[in-house]
């Protein structure tokens, strides 16, 4: 009988909560800075890592946006995404729905097309060379205006076929879901799939999750673990079959722990909870590392690992045929590891 650790490594996995800009490792930052003729305010990679000092979402976001200054031309965005794909191929990641933050670049004078063309080329190469399929989810920055989000949606029109859905990220404090009701309604009418962050332990989290359901009509929730504070909310999330994309290692950095026990509790309640990595260059740990962290803290059975992995494919926005094929591969890997 294979161990749970082996199963976590070998089972084909999906990732649904991954900010591609959050995969920018210090080594690549230095390489891109050199290529682009930029000076970074650190002597080297170790000094940069040591300066990552965040204990809440805003302190993380400050470093996250500052780090993007090295991303200037299309090749930089290609290299960013390709480095991520190459890394997670070694953890048996086979499918990813990947966030990107256009406004974090367009506000620096980088064209929307530069960003998405580089990412798109990496996606094609990752599929061909590494067998990893991916889709893009365009996030609006919630600490910018609703008008800016609407402009971003307009800029995306030219690339409509390259973007599967829209999301909402950045600082949630005083930026509730309803601020973006109109732009989400517009995105829905254009056929985008809809998700939103409800980050862990944010002010008014439960009210924000209700808004996601009742005012926005999201199809899943990024994080959202505070739903456990409201039985009626849990029941409604279950009734609608909404998935939650939880990020344990990230949670440990920006809140008071991984929320592994909450993940376990959501599993026990039959909720469609998943494990994801968020910004793995800043919250160190890619997909398998996040599963391992939950296992180390609360102990996962093989069945629970398989449930979490199946949940990811089930709540993904894959077409039904591809979903069924991936689920067959998950079950085959689980059966192989049990013998
Ligand atoms: N942008 C990148 N990572 C984020 C997170 N964890 N929460 C909100 N916005 C983000
Ligand atoms: Zn996130």
Image (spheres, helix red, strand yellow):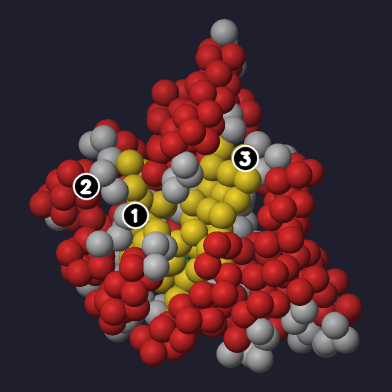
Sequence-wise, the earlier of marks 1 and 2 is: 1
Q: Are the residues tagged 2 and 3 within 8 Å (C-beta)?
A: no
- Looking at the rendered image, the quarter that the N terminus falls into is top right
Q: CA distance from mark 3 to mark 1?
A: 20 Å
Q: Secondary structure at mark 2?
A: helix
Residue 307 located left or right of residue 328: left
Q: Residues within 10 Å of mark 1 (few under 14, many from 20)?
A: many
Q: Residue at x 58, y 70 (%)?
A: 159
Residue 191 seen in the current view: yes
Whichever of callouts 2 and 3 sits on the residue coming sooner in the sequence is 3
For residue 21, the mark is none
Q: Is residue 199 left or right of residue 268?
A: right
- The answer to whether residue 105 is above or below residue 138 is below
Residue at image position (46%, 86%) is: 151
In the image, farthest residue toward the left: 232
Residue at screen point 66% across, 77% down: 113
Taking depth in this image into account, of 89 and 337 the one nearest to the observer is: 89
Pointers 1 and 2 in contact (C-beta within 8 Å) = no
Q: Is residue 69 above or below residue 334?
A: below
Q: Identify the residue at horizontal 67%, vertical 44% (top origin).
A: 132
List x then y, in percent, for residue 332.
55, 18
Mark 2, residue position: 240
Residue at the disc numbered 3:
94
- Name the residue carrying label 1: 220
Query: Along the horizontal axis of the image, is 58 left or right of 1?
Result: left
The Cα atoms of the two marked residues, 1 and 2, are separated by 10 Å
Neighbourhood count class around disc 3 (C-alpha, 10 Å): few under 14, some 14–19, many 20 upward: many
Q: Earlier in the sequence, mark 3 or mark 1?
A: 3
Image position of 137 with respect to 7: above or below = below
Queried on whether the Cβ of the residue with tag 3 lies below 8 angstroms from ligand 2, the answer reads no
Count of picture labels: 3
């Amino acid at each position: 009988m294979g161990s749970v650790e082996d199963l976590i490594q070998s089972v084909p996995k999906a990732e649904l909560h991954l900010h591609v800009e959050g995969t920018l490792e210090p080594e690549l930052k230095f390489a891109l800075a050199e290529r682009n003729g930029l000076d970074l305010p650190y002597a080297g990679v170790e000094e940069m890592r040591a300066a990552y000092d965040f204990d809440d979402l805003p302190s993380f976001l400050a470093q996250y946006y500052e780090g993007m200054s090295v991303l200037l031309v299309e090749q930089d965005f290609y290299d960013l995404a390709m480095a991520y794909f190459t890394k997670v191929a070694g953890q048996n990641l086979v499918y990813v729905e990947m966030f990107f933050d256009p406004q974090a670049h367009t506000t620096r004078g980088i064209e929307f097309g530069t960003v998405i063309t580089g990412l798109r080329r990496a996606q094609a190469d990752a599929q061909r060379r590494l067998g990893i399929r991916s889709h893009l989810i365009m996030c609006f920055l919630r600490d910018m205006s609703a008008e800016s989000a609407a402009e971003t949606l307009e800029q995306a029109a030219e690339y409509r076929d390259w973007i599967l859905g829209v999301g909402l990220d950045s600082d949630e404090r005083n930026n509730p879901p309803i601020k973006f009701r109109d732009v989400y309604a517009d995105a829905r009418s254009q056929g985008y799939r809809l998700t939103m962050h409800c980050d862990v332990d944010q002010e008014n989290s439960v009210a924000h999750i209700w808004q996601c359901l009742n005012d926005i009509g999201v199809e899943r929730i990024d994080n959202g673990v505070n739903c456990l504070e409201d039985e009626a909310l849990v029941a409604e999330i279950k009734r609608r079959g909404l998935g939650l994309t939880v990020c344990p290692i990230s949670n440990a950095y920006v809140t008071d722990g991984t929320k592994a026990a909450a993940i376990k509790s959501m599993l026990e309640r039959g909720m469609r909870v998943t494990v994801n990595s968020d910004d793995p260059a800043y919250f160190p740990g890619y997909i398998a590392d996040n599963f391992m962290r939950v296992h180390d803290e609360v102990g996962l059975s093989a069945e629970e690992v398989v449930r979490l992995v199946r949940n990811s494919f089930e709540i993904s926005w894959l077409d039904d045929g591809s979903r069924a094929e991936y689920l067959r591969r998950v079950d085959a890997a689980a059966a192989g590891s049990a013998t």
